[in-house]
Image: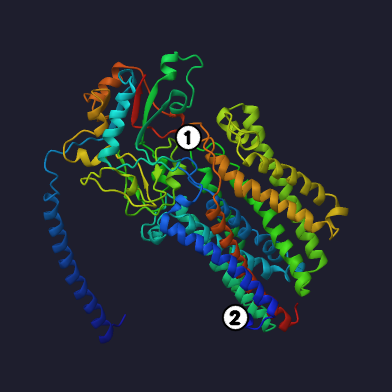
């Protein structure tokens, strides 16, 4: 099926070339990072993780979100999702690849990364994170490829693949739970030390991941005419709405616990993020308020059915939701965990230009992989008459 | 049950193989037993303990010179660079009471106590979160309680820095060597991309010396075996009121402060 990549319209190759251009800018910045070290980033002794790890976290969620299509389709035999499911699985593959790239770009000694396998350390959550991510990549590649191949030959997928499909459902929950455990098990980080962390991660993932998928699918419909079906879009939107409502609810639970208990350690990260702490307000304050307003706005646009089912409003609602969840999890989560630092003082983190360039480069690589995989899927569907 | 000639030969062959290997194994274990007597000789001068610990008598550390002398002793011996940015490296340093003991003990501490500087360094915890999270065992706890780093195994993921509740770890964001004025050839310099921290001078203990900071402190810092009731640290802890940093999080720090 890989040959489908070789036969495409000029527009497709221009698109790939454009992404390749952005990716090479990222690679260029990364070469500087390899030469000079992570000193070219805005990270510091006190804020020792930055944009790379936060993007890794965010895209683990995007990868896990494929389960929101797989679970209804295979556990509840919701047939309407069957047409779109391959797009979700392929998006998971590109998202996991991006996660891996973000981890490698964050390493101080990337050439030693095999040490994680050469010296396996079962007490480290990082060890499990590596295993579940690799496993999820493998499962989605296998399931996606085998089901697409069956679709191409107009036959039922082989029975044994069912096992991997069911496994992928459990596995999707595991990747984001384990990623939450990276944060939630650290005794000195107030903002992360919360039992609800994994639940928050899953709810925000199941809102933002399908929202990104749906936005891309809507763009795809305009570009190629591929229509997943009105009902499929509406059902997925309902899932997104519930997940986002739960996500906002969970965040408010954190706010309640911090402020009603009155425990300074729990309050300080939230106050730092929204108003500044100890006389230090960072650029992130404006972003956090933007996220808060957009999160509420997205719910206002998604909960009433007359807005939710209006296909002119929907892309806006989804876009707003993605921005809100990205600021919350792709920025605030990480910065709030490191500020205030273990000395209860404030060190402000601001990503540098090269750091942003590397990040955007990884986005471009992810989008390239996604474009190629989706092209294969759509061409196979065209041939098989299931477009 | 009838046994064919073929089956008999199979079993006989396996039995012969088994006998042969067991003799070889016996010989190997005998060799290993001989080896046990010949332990690596560390020169006989090395200092040993069941649980190394430190007591800092903050009453005896007053002037800026006291602190500078101690910090310089450590940083010059261990080739710790002076990097003037937020990406700095430090093994031992000072901060104010509120930042060292963040679980504020009293709202109305005596101004002398609150305004003073306190030494900070790795706590060499009994339950070190950094060791728990390290994905490559590049940081590990020795049998004598010292938490050390293998700079050659560290992949620079900085999970240990997120894990350390005491902010004791530094990362070499860039090459540290240009920031070293005088290199001590007896201790390795580090390369960029790895994490480092205080080692309780494990390399000095090996040759019978106390940690550099202890030596430079003129008796303000005590070092000894926490498991030995007659050690200087246990005696000092028995006679004085002492505190540790962030006691509520269960790490059991090995650095005690007499305030």
Estimate the spatial distance between the alpha carbons at disc 1 and disc 2, rounded to whole Å: 51 Å
Q: In this view, does A130 lie to the left or right of A194?
A: left
The quarter of the displayed image where residue A240 is located: bottom right
Q: Where is residue B104 in the image (x, y as percent from the top left)?
A: 49, 22
Q: Which of B198 and A12 is in front in this view?
A: A12
Residues at discs 1 and 2 both on one chain: yes
The residue at the far bottom in this view is B5
The residue at the far right in this view is A306
Q: Which of A153 and B2 is in front in this view?
A: A153
Q: Residue at image x 53%, y 55%? A: A354
- The residue beneath circle 2 is A2
Mark 1 chain: A
Tell me: residue B246, above or below residue A219. Answer: above
Tell me: residue A187, above or below residue A263. Answer: below
Q: Residue at image x 53%, y 54%? A: A355
Inspect this view and state whether residue B213 appears. Answer: yes
Which quarter of the image is occupied by the N terminus of chain A?
bottom right
The quarter of the displayed image where residue B237 is located: top left
- The residue beneath circle 1 is A342
Secondary element at image label 2: helix
Q: Position of residue A215 (x, y in %)?
A: 73, 61
Which quarter of the image is occupied by the C terminus of chain A?
bottom right
Q: Is residue B113 left or right of residue A193?
A: left
Q: Nearer the viewer, residue A123 or A161?
A: A123
Mark 1 vs 2, N-terminal side: 2
Secondary element at image label 1: loop
């Amino acid at each position: 099926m890989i040959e489908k990549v070789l036969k495409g319209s000029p527009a497709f190759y221009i698109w790939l070339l454009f992404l390749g251009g952005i990716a090479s800018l990222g690679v260029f910045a990364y070469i500087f990072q390899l030469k000079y070290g992570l000193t070219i980033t805005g990270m510091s002794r006190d804020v020792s993780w930055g944009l790379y790890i936060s993007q890794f976290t965010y895209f683990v969620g995007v990868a896990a979100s494929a389960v929101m299509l797989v679970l209804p389709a295979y556990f509840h035999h919701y047939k309407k999702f069957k047409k779109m499911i391959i797009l979700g699985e392929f998006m998971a593959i590109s998202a996991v690849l991006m996660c891996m790239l973000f981890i490698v770009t964050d390493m101080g000694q990337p050439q030693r990364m095999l040490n994680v396998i050469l010296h396996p350390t079962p007490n480290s959550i990082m060890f499990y994170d590596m295993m579940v991510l690799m496993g999820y990549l493998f499962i989605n590649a296998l399931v996606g490829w085998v089901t697409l191949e069956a679709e191409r030959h107009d036959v039922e997928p082989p029975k044994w693949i069912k096992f991997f499909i069911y496994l992928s459902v459990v596995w999707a929950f595991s990747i984001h739970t384990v990623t939450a455990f990276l944060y939630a098990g650290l005794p000195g980080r107030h903002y992360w030390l919360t039992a609800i962390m994994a639940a928050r991660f899953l709810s925000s993932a199941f809102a933002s991941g399908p929202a990104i998928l749906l936005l891309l699918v809507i763009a795809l419909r305009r570009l190629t005419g591929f229509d997943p079906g009105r009902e499929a879009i509406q059902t997925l939107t309902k899932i997104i709405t519930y997940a986002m409502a739960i996500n906002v609810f969970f965040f408010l639970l954190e706010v309640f616990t911090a402020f009603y208990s009155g425990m300074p350690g729990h309050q300080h990260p939230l106050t730092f993020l929204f108003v500044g702490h100890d006389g230090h307000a960072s650029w992130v304050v404006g972003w956090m308020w933007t996220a808060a307003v957009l999160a509420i706005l997205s719910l206002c646009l998604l909960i009433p059915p007359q807005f939710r089912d209006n296909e002119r409003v929907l892309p806006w609602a989804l876009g707003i939701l993605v921005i809100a969840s990205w600021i919350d999890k792709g920025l605030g989560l990480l910065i709030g965990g490191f500020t205030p630092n273990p000395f209860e003082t404030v060190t402000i983190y601001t990503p540098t230009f090269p750091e942003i360039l590397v990040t955007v480069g990884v986005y471009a690589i992810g989008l390239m992989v996604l474009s190629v995989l989706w092209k294969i899927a759509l061409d196979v569907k065209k041939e098989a008459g299931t477009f | 049950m009838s046994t064919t000639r073929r089956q008999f030969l199979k079993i006989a062959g396996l039995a012969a193989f088994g006998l042969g290997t067991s003799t070889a194994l016996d010989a190997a274990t005998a060799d290993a037993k001989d080896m046990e007597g010949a332990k690596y000789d560390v020169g006989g001068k090395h200092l040993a303990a069941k649980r190394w610990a430190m007591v800092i008598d903050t009453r005896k550390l007053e002037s800026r010179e006291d602190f500078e002398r101690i910090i310089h002793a450590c940083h010059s011996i261990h080739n710790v660079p002076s990097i003037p940015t937020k990406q700095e490296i430090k093994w031992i340093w000072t901060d104010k009471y509120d930042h060292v003991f963040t679980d504020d003990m009293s709202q109305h501490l005596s101004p002398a106590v609150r305004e003073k500087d306190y030494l900070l360094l790795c706590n060499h915890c009994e339950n070190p979160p950094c060791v728990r999270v390290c994905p490559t065992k590049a940081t590990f706890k020795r049998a004598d309680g010292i938490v050390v780093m293998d700079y050659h195994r560290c992949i620079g993921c900085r999970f240990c820095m997120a894990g350390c509740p005491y902010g004791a770890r530094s990362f070499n964001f860039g090459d540290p060597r240009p920031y070293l004025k005088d290199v001590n050839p007896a201790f390795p310099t580090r390369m960029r991309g790895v994490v480092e921290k205080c080692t309780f001078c494990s390399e000095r203990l090996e040759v019978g010396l106390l940690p550099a900071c202890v030596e430079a402190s003129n008796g303000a810092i005590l070092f000894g075996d926490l498991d030995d009731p007659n050690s200087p640290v246990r005696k000092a802890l028995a006679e004085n009121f002492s505190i540790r940093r962030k006691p509520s999080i269960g790490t059991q720090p090995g650095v005690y402060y007499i305030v």
